Amino acid sequence: MKEYLHEELKKCNNISDFLLFWLSNSAILNNKNTFDMYYRNFLRNFSPRMQKFYRSQSSEVVEMILQKKKPVLLDIGCGCGTETLWFSKLGAKCMGIDVFNSMIEVAKERKKFLEDIWEENISCQYKVASVFNLNPLDTKFDIIWIQQAFHHIEPREYLLPLLFSLLNDDGVLVFSESNAWNPFIQLSLLKMRGLKTIIEVEEGGQLVPWGHERIITPISLMRTLRRHGFTVSPPRYFRLLPSNKIFEKISFLETIWPRALFPAFTHYNLVARKPLTV
C-alpha cells in the first residue's frame, strides 16, 4: 500500500493533482471526517474545471516560490494544510496557522504521512493560533497567503498593520477572496446571515470576534492596503459559476466573459507588496 501511494504521489504535477490524491485517499486519515467535511464541495465535484480554478487560486504564490530561494511563508487560516504542504514541496519554508484545532490535527497528520512516504522532512510547521498571536520580533515572512480567510478575521482594523510588520521588506501579501461586487453572492449571504457580519465564536475557552462572511470588494481592500503602506497590483478576477455539476455544460462562458464585467466573477486574487526600506 505504501509503495502504491508513493507512486500515486509521484504523479502529482501541480496542486490540484495533489489535492485530488487526498480526495481519493482520505480513508488513510484518522481524521478523515474533518477532512471530508472541509472539502465536502470538492468531494461532490472536483472536475477538470474545478481543478483549474483551484490551481488558479494559488498561482501567484506558486510563481513567487519558484522565483525566490526558499522563501518563508505564512498561511493564515491554513485549514487542513493542502497549500502549505504543496508550497513546502516546491521549496518554501512554511508556517500554517488556524484557530481550529481539528484542522491543525489533520494538517499535522498529513505532514507526518508524507514524511513517512517520502522519507524526508517537510519544512512546514502548524500552530493552533490567531494571527494576532504572532510577534513580528520572532519571525518575519517573505510571503503571507490568506485564502478565503480575510473575511473571518476580526478585529479587521488591526490586521493590516500587523501583516505589514510581519513581512520582510519587499515581502508579498496575497489574498484570495470572494468577490463582494457579485450581487448573487451578496444576496445569498444576506439570506444566510442577515446584516450581522461580526459575531462571537469560542476560541481557546473564550468568546472572540469573528467575521461572519464579511466579504469586501477588491477596490475597498486596495484602498485600505495603500493607506497602510502597501503597493498594490490590480485584482485578478476568475470564475463565474457555482461548483455544482449542472453548470459544467455552460462553463464555456467563463472563458469568454469580458473581464470588464467584473461584478459577475465570484472570486478574485489581490497581491500587495511591502516596499523596500530606503
Image (tube, helix red, strand yellow):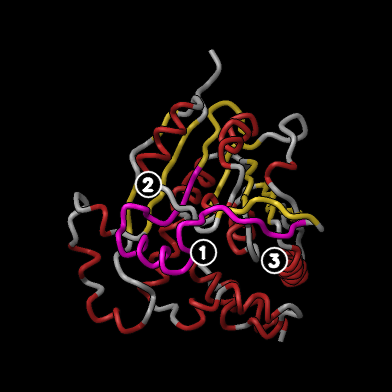
Quadrant where the N terminus sits is bottom right
105 sits to left or right of 236: right
State the CA–CA distance, disc 2 to disc 1: 27 Å
2 sits to left or right of 89: right
State the CA–CA distance, disc 3 to disc 2: 28 Å
Identify the mark nearer the N-term, 3 or 2. Answer: 3
Spot occupied by residue 84 in the image (x, y as percentages of width and height): 62, 56
Specify whether residue 119 is in view. Answer: yes
Give the residue drawn at x 39%, y 39%: 220
97 sits to left or right of 193: right
Q: Quadrant of residue 112?
A: bottom right
The residue wearing badge 1 is: 15
Give the residue drawn at x 69%, y 49%: 95
- Label 3 environment density (alpha carbons within 10 Å; few <14, some 14–19, many ≥20): many
Specify whether residue 118 is in view. Answer: no
Disc 2 or disc 1, which is closer to the eye?
A: 2
Spot occupied by residue 228 in the image (x, y as percentages of width and height): 51, 27
- Amino acid type at image mark 3: Met
Mark 3 secondary-structure assignment:
helix
* Magenta residues, start to end: 174-203
